[in-house]
Image (cartoon, coloured by chain):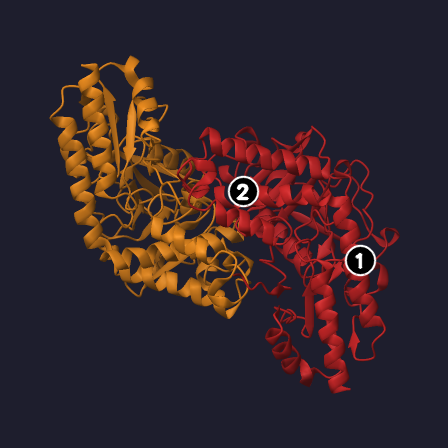
Chain colours: A orange, B red
Amino acid sequence: MSKRAFNFCAGPAALPEAVLLRAQSEMLDWHGKGLSVMEMSHRSDDYVAIAEKAEKDLRDLLSIPSNYKVLFLQGGASQQFAEIPLNLLPENGTADYVETGIWSKKAIEEARRFGNINVAASAKPYDYLAIPGQNEWKLTPGASYLHYASNETIGGLQFDWVPEAGDVPLVVDMSSDILSRPIDVSQYGLIYAGAQKNIGPSGLVVVIVREDLLGRARSSCPTMLDYKISADNGSMYNTPATYSWYLSGLVFEWLKEQGGVAAMEQRNKAKKDRLYGFIDNSDFYTNPISVNARSWMNVPFRLADERLDKAFLAGADARGLLNLKGHRSVGGMRASIYNALGLDAVEALVGYMAEFEKEHS
Amino acid sequence: MSKRAFNFCAGPAALPEAVLLRAQSEMLDWHGKGLSVMEMSHRSDDYVAIAEKAEKDLRDLLSIPSNYKVLFLQGGASQQFAEIPLNLLPENGTADYVETGIWSKKAIEEARRFGNINVAASAKPYDYLAIPGQNEWKLTPGASYLHYASNETIGGLQFDWVPEAGDVPLVVDMSSDILSRPIDVSQYGLIYAGAQKNIGPSGLVVVIVREDLLGRARSSCPTMLDYKISADNGSMYNTPATYSWYLSGLVFEWLKEQGGVAAMEQRNKAKKDRLYGFIDNSDFYTNPISVNARSWMNVPFRLADERLDKAFLAGADARGLLNLKGHRSVGGMRASIYNALGLDAVEALVGYMAEFEKEHS
């Protein structure tokens, strides 16, 4: 019998139990074929069908238009930080970046190694507690692209709007909020997301890219980092991360069974309303992010007295509420409540938070 | 009840059943912690212990000296084809490459995009049926490194000797024969191996690199491809392929239980002797590779009449002998007999081959 905890880890994050049960049952013998998915040639009919179904389900979930390619790559979002300028920024071009926290900052630092980067806007003057409105942004006319992170996993800062980029391709790091609610893919030139939050296990990064942006890679771009090569080869220029791709496909199937991203939006809204509502009604817990920029996925919060942090975490662990410690750069607590966690997880957390507050205030 | 086939796939390849059973049992609840390994933060104590044990077991298995770093990276051997010159070949330097088949050729093509490559030797004049002796090689004095592939997975050509490189760092693609027999790591500057043959699932590449070769990356090298960054961060500059790393660790444990690489060498020798012995004693099956360059891991063979290929494969499939079709560039058959396959698999194959020969000759 399994004893599953509520896992609030920021990533690699909780996966739906139904997905793990399915993977467990298929581990040694997939569909009676006598082998595990991870033992299949990526060129075999069975594996190609698995891979294609995963892509199709993701296309269905996000209504991805047919002029976008979906790539299943390796190296995580961090490798994309280099891959994006190597593919989309000509040596004499300029790209605009918006800085709203640690991840968008890392993207900027890496991109600067490859060309001219303009930080069009920064949340720094707002102490990373709010996102500057687009009227404050200093965009470059004719920029090669405009990059932002829709959700900052560490700071807990999320866009509840989509920047207007005009003809400039909009490039977004959606690692920690993809599939959490509906999006209009056609507003973007390129969407990328490390899998290990809302998609599947780590070691996989999904890139959704408009076809006209392919074929622009610099001559110095490693072949494995050239989007066009990946697209032309169906993400199988070399052996992809086959098992992670398969598991992601199981997550996509599960999402469809749950009612898709519209249903996820309702569920995620209920979860975040419950948690932020509880925090705001308490004198013991605080979240400082301005209300319209609060992340639905990552909820950082502080206790009234940080000397209680250890006791809070120990009590949480004892109740099977795992990985609530905040990122070292922020301190305090953080509850990541991705798709795989239900309202029951949030209720359990809130129940414990109320109990702890009562004991210590 | 599982019905496991004998899987002769060249990669992603068969894994030991004991490893899959262990992964299956731990899928939803690792060591009573209430979560799957793939749901753990890579920075958590539990996961770090898993990762460190995997590295230690690999160090034990290959007796890796302490002045070598072991990296668990993404992107496969194909990404290494770029990563190696970006790290080890100065813009004005020259690297020597030996071409013995499709994979070493791909490594050469990619490296040429980054600098001056000298093909020091090629098996082409031997129709890729033999490896030219080192006395025929044209090495560059002061080369940045000397690269070769110890085993060509597609052609079935394997070095049974180690090139002498003097002070030049020897760089080897061991994707398809690492851990198949003992090696002396100190003879190499850098060893790399895609995981999906003898290590674990795809999506992971292991790099064993001598410390003095770190810190030489070009300024144009993406951060994620800089060996020193990976080494300084314990292969966790970003989220690694955590589940693949864990599974590789289970394979390393299994290898130790089997008696390590010395025991594997005995077992692999028995397997290849049985299979090549049978082929050589038959007038129906042939393998054209010169005897001392025959791969212990990948055994290509042809039937006397290629019109029988389809019937041979169908009969094999029906008996649970899977993935015997040769690579499209070579044709015929190929039996990959990595560590995870025992002599029983080879006996089953030889039994079928004898039966098929009797029926059709």
Relative horizontal placement of residue B132, taking residue A38 as reference (left or right): right
The outermost residue toward the right is B135
For residue B336, which quarter of the picture?
bottom right
Q: Residue at x 13, y 32 (%)?
A: A277
Q: Where residue A195 sits in the image (x, y, percent)?
A: 39, 47
* Residue situated in front as seen by the camera: A117 or B306: B306
Asked if badge 1 and badge 2 are on a common chain, one would say yes
Foreground: disc 1 or disc 2: 1
For residue B256, which quarter of the picture?
top right
Q: In this orientation, does residue B125 appear? A: no
* Residue situated in front as seen by the camera: B165 or B17: B17
Q: In this orientation, does residue B301 appear? A: yes
Relative horizontal placement of residue A97, taking residue B190 as reference (left or right): left
Q: Residue at x 20, y 36 (%)?
A: A347
Q: What subunit carries mark 2? A: B
Q: Where residue B4 sits in the image (x, y, percent)?
A: 58, 63
- Tell me the crowding category of disc 2: few under 14, some 14 to 19, or many 20 or more residues within 10 angstroms, Cα based: many
Q: Where residue B22 sits in the image (x, y, percent)?
A: 54, 47
Residue wearing tag 1: B270
- Which numbered disc, 1 or 2, marks the residue that appears first in the sequence? 2
Q: Amino acid at mark 2?
A: Trp
Q: Residue at x 62, y 48 (%)?
A: B199
Q: Residue at x 33, y 56 (%)?
A: A252
* Residue situated in front as seen by the camera: B287 or A144: B287
- Tell me the CA gap for discs 1 and 2: 29 Å
- Tell me the crowding category of disc 1: few under 14, some 14 to 19, or many 20 or more residues within 10 angstroms, Cα based: some
Relative horizontal placement of residue A133, taking residue A307 as reference (left or right): left
Q: What subunit carries mark 1? A: B
Residue wearing tag 2: B245
Relative horizontal placement of residue B37, taking residue B343 as reference (left or right): left
The outermost residue toward the left is A281
Please identify the quadrant where the C terminus of chain A is shown: top left
